[in-house]
Image (cartoon, helix red, strand yellow):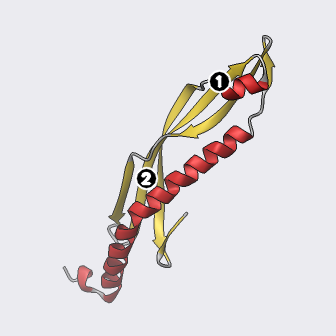
Amino acid sequence: MVERLTPERIKRNREFKMAAATFPDFCKHWEQNLRDREVNNLHKLNFSEKAGFETATYTGYGKIVGCESHQSKDGYSIGKLSYEEFVYYVVGKTKEEARSAIPKAISDLHTTEIFRWENNKWFY
């Protein structure tokens, strides 16, 4: 009980209240970053020819499915978000046809990212 009443712990508890209140917006911003990264990946497709077809892969991202903030045992603010990361495959007779083809997910990876609160903002 004494540990929770130290000035340092009181400061960390106040920081956590602010951090926890802002983490949902941070998660929305991070999800937009993932959307932007996926669009950028699509613009930079690296094609190769296989059996007379143009093929390429790129990384895409699912929606953020977990957005949680926690306080460590020592009182530090920690944010955790989770989403799926996909590798997509496109194919067509031409690069243009491949670009407009419906992508096929060939792998997916559950991704969890952890962030810390520092200087009144989430740090990454």
What mark, if any, has residue 81 been given in the picture? 2
Q: Secondary structure at mark 2?
A: strand
Sort mark 2 into few (<14), some (14-19) or many (20+) by Cα contacts within 10 Å.
many
Q: Earlier in the sequence, mark 1 or mark 2?
A: 2
From what the image shows, is residue 107 above or below residue 35?
A: above
Q: Where does residue 76 sit, x and y in percent of width and height?
A: 39, 71
From what the image shows, is residue 45 above or below residue 120?
A: above
- Residue 44: image quadrant is top right
Q: Residue at x 77, y 33 (%)?
A: 46
Q: Residue at x 60, y 26 (%)?
A: 103
Left or right for 4, reference 103: left
Sort mark 1 into few (<14), some (14-19) or many (20+) by Cα contacts within 10 Å.
few
Identify which residue, 121 or 78, lies in the foreground. 121
- Residue 68: image quadrant is bottom left
Identify which residue, 2 or 20, lies in the foreground. 20
Q: CA distance from mark 1 to mark 2?
A: 31 Å
Q: Where does residue 14 sit, x and y in percent of width and height?
A: 33, 80
Left or right for 60, reference 17: right
Residue lying at the far left of the rendered structure: 1
From what the image shows, is residue 105 above or below residue 115?
A: above
What mark, if any, has residue 101 been given in the picture? 1
Q: Where does residue 99 sit, x and y in percent of width and height?
A: 70, 29
Left or right for 25, reference 91: left
Q: Secondary structure at mark 1?
A: loop
Tell me the quarter of the image containing the C terminus: bottom right
Q: Where does residue 61 sit, x and y in percent of width and height?
A: 53, 41
Q: Residue at x 78, y 21 (%)?
A: 94
Q: Residue at x 49, y 74 (%)?
A: 118
What mark, if any, has residue 31 been given in the picture? none
From what the image shows, is residue 104 above or below residue 21?
A: above
